[in-house]
Amino acid sequence: MLEMRPNCECCDRDLLPDSTEAMICTFECTFCRDCVDNRLHGICPNCGGGFVPRPVRPAKLLMKYPASTKRIHNPKCAEPVTSGTAS
């Protein structure tokens, strides 16, 4: 079952369980659509994979299966990765 994480890992924007702006990778790293499109260019900074829209959990199931409250935030997520090798 998806955790339904509450925020964008990059900009810390709130992403409610019914948000259509939430995007996830295969490891459920969670980002807002704006960061995915404009900062990350469709590539997860954690695993290198792509993104899909996060499904919306039906409201009637949120009581039985609540969304996560654990926030993950890495403001450096959109910084360019350097190889560490000098040329």
Image (cartoon, rainbow, N blue to C red):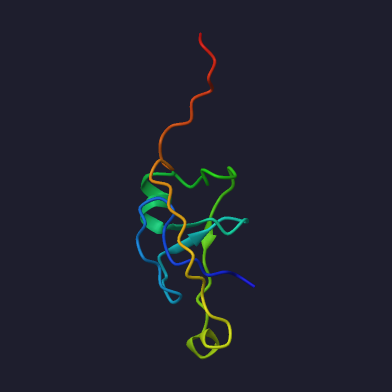
Q: Residue at x 58, y 82 (%)?
A: 65
Of residues 25 and 10, the one drawn nearer to the viewer in this rendering:
10
> Is 43 rendered above or below residue 7?
above
Q: Position of residue 45 (x, y in %)?
A: 51, 43
The total number of labels drawn is 0
As drawn, which residue projects farthest toward the front? 70
Q: Residue at x 44, y 64 (%)?
A: 22
Quadrant in the picture for residue 80: top left
> Is 40 rendered above or below residue 87?
below
Q: Residue at x 58, y 87 (%)?
A: 64
Quadrant of the snapshot with the N terminus: bottom right
Q: Position of residue 38 (x, y in %)?
A: 36, 46
75 displayed left or right of 70: left
Q: Position of residue 15 (x, y in %)?
A: 40, 67
As drawn, which residue projects farthest toward the top? 87
Of residues 81 and 43, the one drawn nearer to the viewer in this rendering:
81
As drawn, which residue projects farthest toward the right? 1
Q: Position of residue 76 (x, y in %)?
A: 40, 40
